Amino acid sequence: MAAQAAAHVAGVLDVANEIQVHVTGSHERTDTEIARAVRDALESDVVVPDTQIRSNVSRGWVTLESEVRAWHERDAAERAICNLPGVRGVIDTLGVNRRSVKTETETIHDEIQQALERRAERNAKHIQIMVRDGTVELRGPVQSWAEREAVLGAARYTPGVKDVEDHLHFEQFA
């Protein structure tokens, strides 16, 4: 987070991140121990397709590699390991492979629309959903930050969605 903050300072083009995290306690885990804990955590999470994910551990930093079928699998993998003892950070390079799920543009659109309609507080007719090549573009008004996150989540976690473009805006309905 510090490196990201530094990169956003006006005029900064490059950041040399030499921050070191020291784990408190009497025993610092080796990369081998961390790798075993990562594999155990991935295998024990029912949402994570553990056999599809490769990990690489270097000085406590875990890199997740390969492809998963949906956004929620990617998020679940990172969540499963980010707080393991000895893990200093997670570099998530997992791709979402929409080709592994045979879905059509109309199916993606309809599933997102149905997910929005299931939410009682959401008036789904105000949200425009455009789908092309696995990318979903959302436009329209939302009433709150929570509603915005719910709409984005409905799109991100629909099988076949590769990316979501957020063009939602805040507006109070009469």
Image: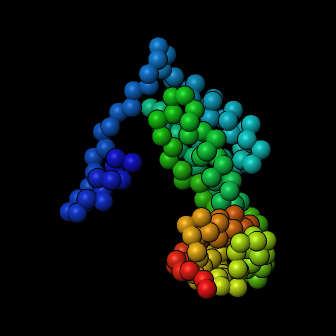
User: In the image, is residue 24 above or below residue 16?
Assistant: above
- Residue 35 screen position, x and y as percent: 59, 31
Residue shown at 23%/63% (left/top)? 10
Q: How many marks?
A: 0
Residue found at the far front of this picture? 174
80 or 144: nearer the eye? 144
Q: Residue at x 27, y 46 (%)?
A: 16
Answer above or below: position of 104 versus 56: below
The answer, for residue 99, to whether it is visible in the render is no
Q: Quadrant of residue 116?
A: bottom right
In this view, which residue lies farthest toward the top?
26
Q: Residue at 50% across / 47% down in the picture?
A: 91
Direction from residue 5 to residue 56 in the image, left or right: right
Residue 4 image offset from top left, x and y in percent = 36, 53
Which quadrant of the view contains residue 104?
bottom right
On screen, residue 27 versus residue 162, left or right, reads left
State the residue in front, 101 or 131: 131
